[in-house]
Amino acid sequence: MLIHPDFLWNTPLASAINQYDFCDYAINEALFLSEREETILNQLVENIQREYFASIDKFSQRIIISQLETLLNYAD
């Protein structure tokens, strides 16, 4: 998933993005998930996709940012 930095501009997530340490993983490191965690992360990605491909309105960015932040918190 790629998120353009401008999409995060002036959001609380833009200020907090540096708190997520997993962005600095080495090439030989991995994120291990249980089946339950994998299901949750997949559902969050699907929620983001649904909102992105639906009719964009004034709430879309906030909803996507919220789902993205939840996804990052689970991955953390």
Image (cartoon, rainbow, N blue to C red):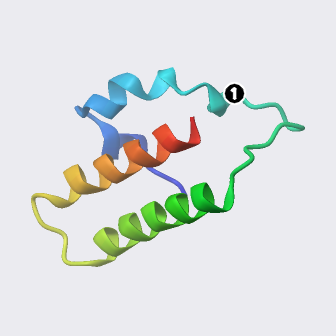
39 sits left or right of 61 in the view? right
Quarter of the picture containing the N terminus is bottom right
51 sits left or right of 25 in the view? left
Which of the 4 image quarters holds residue 50? bottom left
Question: Observer-nearest residue: 3 or 72?
Answer: 72
Residue at the farthest right position: 28
Question: Observer-nearest residue: 64 or 44?
Answer: 44
Pinpoint residue 48: horizontal percent, then vertical percent: 38, 64
Q: Amino acid at mark 1?
A: Asp
Q: In the picture shown, does residue 63 fall above or below 73?
A: below
19 sits left or right of 33 in the view? left
Question: Observer-nearest residue: 19 or 57?
Answer: 19
Q: In the picture shown, does residue 17 fall above or below 34?
A: above
Q: Which residue is mark 1?
A: 24
Q: Secondary structure at mark 1?
A: helix
Residue at the farthest left position: 58
Pinpoint residue 33: horizontal percent, then vertical percent: 69, 51
Which of the 4 image quarters holds residue 22? top right
Pinpoint residue 30: horizontal percent, then vertical percent: 79, 42
The residue sitting at 30% across, 55% down in the picture is 64
Question: Observer-nearest residue: 34 or 21?
Answer: 34
The residue sitting at 47% across, 63% down in the picture is 45
Q: How many marks?
A: 1
Pinpoint residue 69: horizontal percent, then vertical percent: 39, 42
Q: In the picture shown, does residue 34 fall above or below 70?
A: below
55 sits left or right of 32 in the view? left
Quarter of the picture containing the C terminus is top right
Crowding near the residue tagged with mark 1, few <14, some 14–19, many ≥20 C-alpha atoms within 10 Å: few
